[in-house]
Structure formats: structure tokens, C-alpha cells
Amino acid sequence: MSEASTLLKVEDLYVKYRSYWYTYHVLDGVSIRIKPGEKVGLIGESGAGKTTLLKSILRILPPQGRITKGKILYKDINLLRCSKGTLLEIRRKKVGMIFQDPLAALNPVFTIKEQMVDILKYIYKGSNYKKSDLENIALELLREVMLPDPERVLNSYPFQLSGGMRQRVVIAMALASAQELLLADEPTTNLDVTIQAQILKLISNLVEKRRLSMVLVSHALGMVRSMTKRIYVMYGGNIVEEAPSSKLFNEPLHPYTQLLIENAPKIIATKLGEGIKGNPPDYRYPPPGCRFHPRCPYAMDICKKVKPLLIKVNNDRYVACHLYAEKDMIKKLEV
Amino acid sequence: MANTDIEKGSEHPIMLRLKNLKKYFPTSRGTVKAVDGISLNVFKGETLALVGESGSGKTTTAHVILGRYIATEGSVLYKNIEIGHMPLIKRPLWLRREIQIVFQDPATSLNPKKTVKDIIEVAIKIHYPKLSKLDRVERLLELLRYVGLTEDFLFKLPGELGGGEKQLVALARALATDPKFLILDEPTSALDVSAQSKILKTLLNIQRDRRLSYILITHDLAVVRNISHRVAVMYLGKIVEKAPTEELFSNPLHPYTRMLLSSIPTLTEEESKLLPKGIESTGEIASAINPPPGCRFHPRCPYAMDICKKMEPPDINVSKGSKVRIVKCWLYAEESKTKL
């Protein structure tokens, strides 16, 4: 793929968190790429590093988090090397992020109007918009997310709104700065199924209308399937599989993806899975080799020593697992 | 998988019967009608799922059964004894022993400073004071093994356990008193996929083993499909549909049930084919202080008629054979409508 057709490219990214006693080796060589207008999903269980990856892209990791290696290219700008001004410009005008918990993302002691105008002031810094102009923009954004009675919402405090309405406000705030890319971090956790369906529809309509690219992060597998074209599966700070959404669920390749899909409760009453034995890796002392090997039913000796790289197994499918590398090698030998 | 061989009959006595149960909370802004006249039966060895959006009164119902709230009106009969107006502290010990609960989030329902041993032992100590220390520990180990944990967990703190393991400890604690009736309040919604199926499987095994009755409160319909025998769908304090699980999923009747089902995100094409078409989620659940007149669902209902806005629909029996099915919707009341 040529550089020009890539909007965002993360290459071999390593992120560590440090506490007083320990270092947590979270992201372990993550690479993803997003083309303009593409909708990409990122799935994995809690603690797989999904949010860390999103936050690294915007460079908003908490102070304990450090990017130790890698590259993040937004078009041709390396976000890890660029000037503060360029970075702020991208945050203000290009990339918007929907944060996980709408209650935590909104300040309880300010009205929605105060909070939105605050954000807009920052986004339109340098232009000579008056406060009333900014209020109109805020109103317009609230209309865009289909909030009934936006005037009332604008003057409300977050606690006066329902969960679905709060999430719509948070989406409106993300839209204010998302001209090119929308990062959605679990946009529907804590919402009821019916409201979840409404919010998802809203997001996909907005993305379509504004011609945005999107990264959708979630552990709700079905939701990601319906919203995206391509999916990355994360486990323990690694990308373990990449596949088109249409194929991933019918034919998962990585043992982790297979177990994950097998164990997800489905409405077709099939047998319940056994669960995946063991726990997610301890980031202080991540397992050597493949980070999934202690829980993997197919683990071989090599898995304990060598970290598998993401390899191409088909036209559009990639997997990081020694099971597939070996088959490749055998094929090569036969040829 | 849930087997639907449990139907009415003498070998499945009724464990719990709710009759026109109401629970109101007076507030400064008006009375919150959290549960407003619901009736249902739970049989021995059966799982009844209570589903519905947040704010529909599922958890309030559970807490009335547990005795944490006192019913405003109506009755809760447990083994034919009226317990709805009996607060928890006035309940006899045997009753408290028999009805237990597993909470949603094990990270907050387990004391982070106590070891697994302490957490479970307290329940045994209170309910079986005559047991010697040795017997107590023996019972404790038995419980741990029963839910699929090992003795290695005895002296661990909840913080050292994974989400699924924590929920298993919470389950072991609930089982410590040898309950007959277990309330499961969103038992898997705080867990990751890999831990969910383990918990569900354990729950099924325990039920088969001990013939427990469960009330499963959840909004995850896939979980309902997998472990419950019957489903009651709640909306704003009312039960709008009651049906055996399979029937409900293959042929949902109430428009709200259809809306719920059509909102489930699916994993495969096969699954999406099963979901009802032509109904889309709109609007939000109204306030329980001032519920809409008539049918409470009518502002969100695509099939709303004039009568829905004026009169509350009655419980309409649409049972076929032995499978009892009740739906609270004017759409199914052709005959009764003409009578009015």
C-alpha cells in the first residue's frame, strides 16, 4: 500500500506505564493503518491495550504512560516527533475522540453549554468568533446528533440528562474537532440495548455524512462486526489478528479469536463454551514469546520463546501465530 | 443450554409467587412507581429471566423479594408464606438462608481487604453457628471446589483474582447457606467474554445438581437465551410479556420485545436472520414518576393506536397448549376490544 492512501499509520509502537514499584509493559509492538474513509474495529477484552493505543495516537496518555519506541504517522506527520503546535492543530481540527464513560467525560458542575463553548473556544482559537457564535455552533452540533429539544439540553447539567442523551452530547463534542478521523472508545458501554442500537446508528450516519474515517474500539463483538469493514483483534498489548469483518467471525484464525468467538453467548442456542482458562497477562512480567501461550490450547515450544509476528496468510488476512508460520514454512519447503 | 422440559405440574411446585406487587418510592418530585402491579410465578428448579431496560424495575423487584424493600401493595409468597411485608431484619434465619443473591459487579460486592476464606466463612458462621472450626473450613473447601476453584484461592484477596474468579467467589458465598432460591442480578455483565461462559456453565450445573430456582436479571438477551426457561419482559414497572424462552425468541409478540430483540448486535448472518425486522429502536424509557397514560410503551411504539393512549391493555392470554404465554398489548385483543 502506498503512503499516500494511508491516513493514519502506527508502526511498531511500544508503550510502558510506570508506577513506583513496577513497570507495566503494555503495548508490545503494535502496528495498524487506516485508509481515508475507512472504518476499522479494534476488539479485545478489557486490559488488552485498546484504550492505550487510542490515547497514544492523540498523545494524551496519563503521565505514567510513556511511548518508548515506534512511529505514529498521521498522513506524513510523525506525531511523536512533530512540534507541539502541529499536534494541537491535529487535535483541534482533524481528530475527534468519543470517550468511554459519558458520565466521567462530562464535568458535573458545569452546564453542557459552558463545557461545549469551552471546547469550541479552543478549537476556533485565533478566529474572531463571538461567544454567541460559539453557542450557535454548539446548538448546531447538538441538532446534528439528533437530540430532541437541543436548547434545553444546552442549559442542563449532565445529571439532568439520561445516559443516551449524555452519550449524544459526548459525540457532539467529538464531532466538533473530527474533520477527518473519529476515534470511538467503547461508545455504548453502560447503555441499554435499545439505546445502544440508536447510538450506533447515529454514529454510522454521521461518519457517512461527514466522510470520516473511524476507529471503533469495543469488546462487544457483534457491534463491531456491524459497524466496520476491517477488524484488528488485540490480546495482551499485541495485535494478534487482522481480518475483514465479514470473514473474521465465520473463520477466525488465531486461537484466541477462535476461543473468544466460541465463548460469546449467542442467541442461537448452541452449547456454551468452556471459557478461556487462565487470566490475561500480568503486564509487569508478561510471558515471553507469544503472550497468549499460557492460555493457548495449541501452545508449542516455540511459542514460549519466540514472539510471533503478524504474517499474511491470505489476500486480506493477517495473523500473529506460530501455527500459521509453520504451515507457511512447510509450503515453502515443498515448493 | 436451557432445557424447556419444565412446565407446570405437581413435580414442579411453585417456589415464589408475586401477586399484583407494587413498590412506590415517595420523593420530593412525586411518587416513583418503580414496580407497578406485577404478577409472576417461579417454579422449583426453574430459571425465570427478568429482562428490560434500566429503569424498568427489575432490581427493585429483586430487592422486594430479598426483603431489602417492603412491598407497597400486593403480595410476595415464598412457599406460600407472605414475605413481601417482612423487612430483612424481621425475617427468620431459615428464610434468609434460603433466598440469596449474587450481585452484578464482584469487584464491589467483595470486601477488598478480606481474603476469600474470610468472605465465605462469615456466611457459614452466621447460619451454622454450631459447626466446629474444622467442619467450617471443610465446608468452605467443598464450596470452593464446587464452583470450580481450588484451595490455592483461600488466602487470596479479591484484588488478586480475575473478574471471573471473583464472581465465582461471590457465587460460593451465596451458596454457603445452602439456598433454595437464588437471585442473579446481572451476573455476567461486568465480566469479559472469556469469563462469562464459565460462570453461566457453573450456574447451570449447580441448578441441575441442587434443583435451585433462579431469577435472572439481565439485559443481555444472549445470556437469557442460553440459560433461562421462561422470560418476563418488563417495561416501566409492568410486565409486558411472559413466555417460554424459545417461544419468545422465535416469535416475539409485544412490540417492545421485538424492539429489544432487533437491537441485539449479532455475530453471524445466521443470527441476524432470526431477529425481527421492521421495527427500529426509537425514543427512551419515560420517567416512572409520571408514566404515560394508557399503555406505557405507546410513545415509542410504531403500532400505537388510539386506544393505547387512553387505556392500559389487559393481560391477554395467548397460550398454546401447555405453554403459557401472556402479552399486555391491545394488538392481540381483537375480541376484548369489540366488547369495550
Image (cartoon, rainbow, N blue to C red):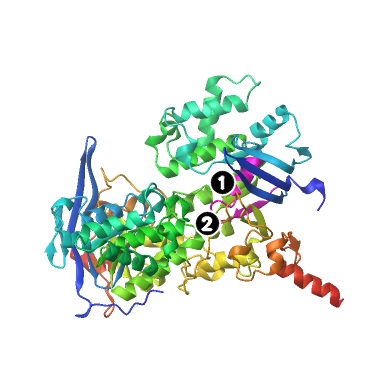
- Check the picture and name the quadrant holding the N terminus of chain B: bottom left
Residue underneath mark 1:
A185
Q: Is residue A103 left or right of residue B294?
A: right
Q: Residue at x 60, y 48 (%)?
A: A284
Considering only order in the chain, which callout, 1 or 2, is on the residue closer to the N terminus? 1
Q: CA distance from mark 2 to mark 1?
A: 12 Å
**Residue type beneath disc 1:** Asp
- Name the quadrant of the C terminus of chain B: bottom left
Q: Is residue A46 magenta?
A: yes
* Residue B67 x/y as whole percent: 20, 54
Q: Which mark is residue A220?
A: 2
> Dot 2 lies on which element?
loop
- In depth, the one of B131 and B127 nearer the eye is B131
Residue A313 drawn at (x, y percent): 75, 67
For residue B63, above or below residue A271: above
Image coords of residue A128 (percent x, y): 63, 19
Kind of residue at disc 2: Ala
Disc 2 + disc 1, Cβ < 8 Å: no
* B159 magenta-colored: no
Stretch of the chain drawn in magenta: A37-56
Q: Secondary structure at mark 1?
A: strand
Position of B3 with respect to A1 (left or right) is: left
Question: Would residue B105 be seen by someone viewing this image from the given angle?
Answer: no
Subunit bearing disc 2 = A
Q: Residues within 10 Å of mark 1 (few under 14, many from 20)?
A: many
Indicate the chain on which mark 1 is placed. A
